[in-house]
Image (cartoon, rainbow, N blue to C red):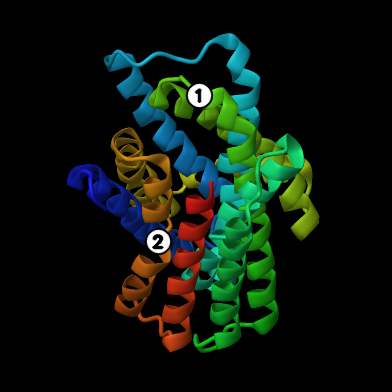
Amino acid sequence: MAGIELLPALCALGSAATWALGSHLFRRALAHGAGAAPPSAAAANLFKNALAFAVFAAVVAASSSGLPESARWPALLLSGFFGFALGDTLYFAALPRCGVQLAAMVALVHVPAAVLLGWILHGERLPWSALLGGALVVLGVACVVGEGPRAAGRDPRARRVGVAFAALGAVAQAAGVVTGHAAMQGVDVLGGTLARMSGGIAGAFVVAAVLGSAARGASVLGEVVALARPWRERGARRGLFLAALFGSVIGLPLFHLALRGLPSGVAAVLFATTPLFTLPLGLALGERHGARAVLGALLGIAGVAAVVAAR
């Protein structure tokens, strides 16, 4: 860590910690809700993205930050669709099914998945140490999956579905990274993020229509209308507001401050510490995990570090 400034490093860890807390709060909001049924994962994600977009738009308008040139918008919008719309919605769908710790661990797969997609789509170098790092991430996830559910009454089938959602979400996040990587080069971080969030907000309607109707057999119109539930119902809005406040409104500025002050590889490793924060937060909220969860988190972060070092 020689030569790494303390404040940006603390911002990176703070971003990981706030996302961990936001994940627990989102799980509670999605598992219990405030009315007859909890809001859908797509509705919760749209609420989070819209709130963060409003904050970032205000910051960009009040600062010297500029928006990307028009030629970069298609790639940034597509990146936002994969990352903010599809990836985050699948992650939120996983939270009440398999729990925060397991979902956060599976989400680490997006780092080696991004490297693999970069190799497939762009011919980027794939050294053996990146493959080793990817294997460590998978081994860490396997440790947590193999521990078995400790929450009383958790449905094993729902747990498997949650793991599948989290894995697909990680692949979508990786696709978002690969798609938007070149377009973000030389672009103001805040302006580029605002462009990506635009894709996330627009994509939420597509994701809700396709995933919602496929999963529950509901009508496309009904799924799109359900996206407004958190804005109409005070109870649902209150729970999601706290989750979005920590997970995005506070976490994203810390994320970008860290990106500005740290080498991207160091920042990526520090961002990947989220599973270490979800463990004590889960214990405080009544979740129970064994030694395999701790070992899996450490292996996963070590794997991320190896992948980043290889790049």
186 vs 56, left or right, is right
In this rendering, the count of numbered labels is: 2
User: Does label 2 or label 1 sit earlier along the sequence?
Assistant: 1
Q: Is residue 93 above or below residue 73?
A: below
> In this orientation, does residue 226 appear?
no
Q: Is residue 297 above or below residue 230?
A: below
Q: Is residue 244 above or below residue 31?
A: above
Query: Residue 31 appears at what percent x and percent y?
Result: 51, 67
Number of the label disc, if any, that sits on residue 30: none
Identify the image quadrant of residue 191. top left
Query: Residue 306 appears at what percent x and percent y?
Result: 50, 59
The amino acid type, in three-letter code, at marker 2 is Thr
Q: Secondary structure at mark 1?
A: loop
Q: Kindly identify the residue that appears in the image at 64 percent across and 25 percent down.
A: 75
User: Residue most toward the front?
Assistant: 128
Q: Kindly identify the residue that appears in the image at 45 percent across and 61 percent down.
A: 29
Q: Of residues 250 and 296, which is closer to you in this image?
A: 296
Marks 2 and 1, how far apart in space? 26 Å
Indicate which label's residue lies in the foreground, 2 or 1. Answer: 1
Q: Which residue is mark 2?
A: 274
Q: Kindly identify the residue that appears in the image at 50 percent across and 88 percent down.
A: 150
Q: Is residue 139 above or below residue 269?
A: below
178 vs 96, left or right, is right
The amino acid type, in three-letter code, at marker 1 is Gln
